[in-house]
Amino acid sequence: MTLSPEPFPFRLVHVDETNSTNSYLQSLCNAQLVEEFTTVITDFQTAGRGQRGNSWESEIGKNLLFSFVLFPKFLEARRQFLISQIISLAIKEELDTYTPDISIKWPNDIYWKQKKICGMLIENDLMGKQLSQSIAGIGININQESFFSPAPNPISLLQITQKKYDLFTILKNIMHRIQDYYTLLQQNQVEWIANHYEKALFRKEGLHLYKDVNGIFLARIVQVEAEGRLILEDENQRKRNYMFKEVEYILER
Ligand code: BTN
């Protein structure tokens, strides 16, 4: 990544290569006092970590791979989903400026149509009933031309728009947006955040296919609760509640 002379609003650590920016930032936080919003960015991860123990593929220098740290001590641990919501909204709104059809796939993937353009791995530490530290790691596919990993449906901004982008500009814009949303969170504007999150959801309307331990079913999204639980209503008007990883979206081809 070429760092432009434009100022970045927070401490920025750029490393050419690391195993994982989340792990790098975690070590930094363990080793020294780190300011909130300190951001670590890399050109290449040798062991990029995804959700559910998956890995994260990204070609060298092509995409945004970064992590930043928050210390949301004002937030109760049971409200930690709000961190996911504000980061998802900030990224969605930045990507909206380049292409239509961006949405948030519950809980915190960013989609273009039926394809995944961004994933995040948020690692929270608790102190009693409060959050003490959140390390948010974000991978956004920007300039990659093709994908080879077994991930089912990756897509990049270049594949969508046939244009190349300056990574640093997008990073800076996203961090400004996250800072604005974090201020809203500090002001306890949680209803506003939840409403905007629900409006931004992938499959917010209509019946779609899902899969849980009992098999495949058709359902519509009713609500995402404050603690992050997804409420679906199936064809028989039966409500089904899921925490993360308990339900899978069956995607259209
Ligand atoms: C997912 O599986 O959807 C989450 C992917 C998160 C990938 C990002 S890339 C930067 C940061 N460092 C990591 O090791 N993972 C996250």
Image (tube, rainbow, N blue to C red):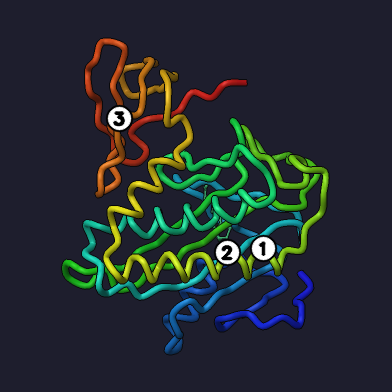
The image position of residue 208, as x and y in percent, is: 44, 20
Which residue is drawn at the image coordinates 21% and 57% (left, top)?
A: 78
Q: Quadrant of residue 138?
A: bottom right
Position of the N terminus, as image quadrant, is bottom right
Residue most toward the top? 236
In this rendering, is residue 72 above or below 252? below
Residue 222: numbered disc:
3
Q: Nearer the viewer, residue 112 or 249?
A: 112
Mark 3 secondary-structure assignment: strand
In this rendering, is residue 240 above or below 126? above
Residue 174: numbered disc:
2
The image position of residue 175, as x and y in percent, is: 55, 69
| Amino acid on which disc 2 is placed | Ile
Distance from label 2 to label 3 (Cα)? 29 Å
Q: Quadrant of residue 75?
A: bottom left
Residue highlighted by disc 1: 170
Mark 2 neighbour density, 10 Å: few (under 14) some (14–19) many (20 or more): many
Distance from label 3 to label 1 (Cα)? 33 Å
Residue most toward the bottom? 33
Q: Nearer the viewer, residue 73 or 6?
A: 6
**Mark 2 and mark 1 in contact (Cβ < 8 Å)?**
yes
